[in-house]
Amino acid sequence: MTDAVSATPRSAKPRIRYLWDDPLPPLDTRDITKAIGLWCVVVAASAAPSFAMGTLMQNADPVGVLAMCLGLVLIIAGYVRWTVSAWGRRLRRLPFIMLTAYIGYGTRIALSMIAATGIGAFPDMLVGVVVGLTLDSVLSAGFSLSQWNDSAASGLVHFAAILVWTLLTALAWNLILGVYMLALYGLQRLVRKMPTGRPGQVCLGCGYDLRMSTGNCPECGTPIPAPSHLAPLDKPPQRQISV
């Protein structure tokens, strides 16, 4: 006697594989606008102490201030470019990634707010000074124009030096935040269970579970596709059991 026994349990594969491989929705203009607004706020809040200290160090020199402003614009552009890229969009919708980013950049903004009071300015000062001394040793010249004649060339050198200092300071902070957020992510992997299988509906924009939602994703606002557009659950092959 032969009975065909079929079972369709959810796959034991981590949901991270589904969410990484699922197709991305079309990039909307609103997504780019939201990314620009988000990173303008984050970068402005994070860089405020370093910008203020740099301005004081330069005695409000317009060339130095302009170089720092250009550096901040380039930093924001880099963040936005990463946010709207396919790799960045896929990464953000994986489990624990967004929470890790919220905590990481929230901590950075909190440090900046504390530094604005003058109490906790040491981290920003330390990073800025270390980057400045490193750049100074590499170039074998400081940011001062005392050894240069008053000319367009000296102004250009000064502008370039401040711009590089601004970008390297941002890079140093990103490296620090990267290590911090890797530790946060690792801690979540230890104490929280990684979701497995595919929920009945999952947002193609951020991976949010949409089984209790209609219309748009409550997390990122992406329109919820029709059920037929969602990838099906994994189904293991039928097994023939002989008795």
Image: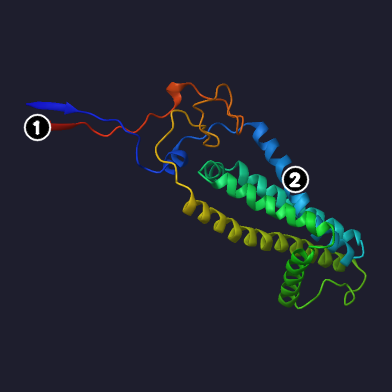
Residue 72 position (above or below residue 137): above
> Where, quadrant-wise, is the C terminus in this rendering?
top left
Q: Is residue 7 left or right of residue 52?
A: left
Task: Inspect the image, locate mark 1, and give the three-letter code of the amino acid beneath it.
Answer: Ser
Residue 130 position (above or below residue 210): below
Q: What crowding class fits label 1: few (fewer than 14 Cα within 10 Å), some (14-19), or many (20 or more)?
A: few
Q: Residue at x 81, y 54 (%)?
A: 69
N-terminal-most mark, 1 or 2: 2
> Hey, which quadrant is residue 55 in on the image?
bottom right
Is any atom of residue 73 visible in this view?
Answer: no
Q: Residue at x 53, y 34 (%)?
A: 208
Q: Nearer the viewer, residue 187 or 178?
A: 187
Where does the image place residue 192, in percent across and percent down from the top left?
48, 48
Residue 17 position (above or below residue 47): above
Is any atom of residue 61 visible in this view?
Answer: yes
- Residue assigned mark 2: 40
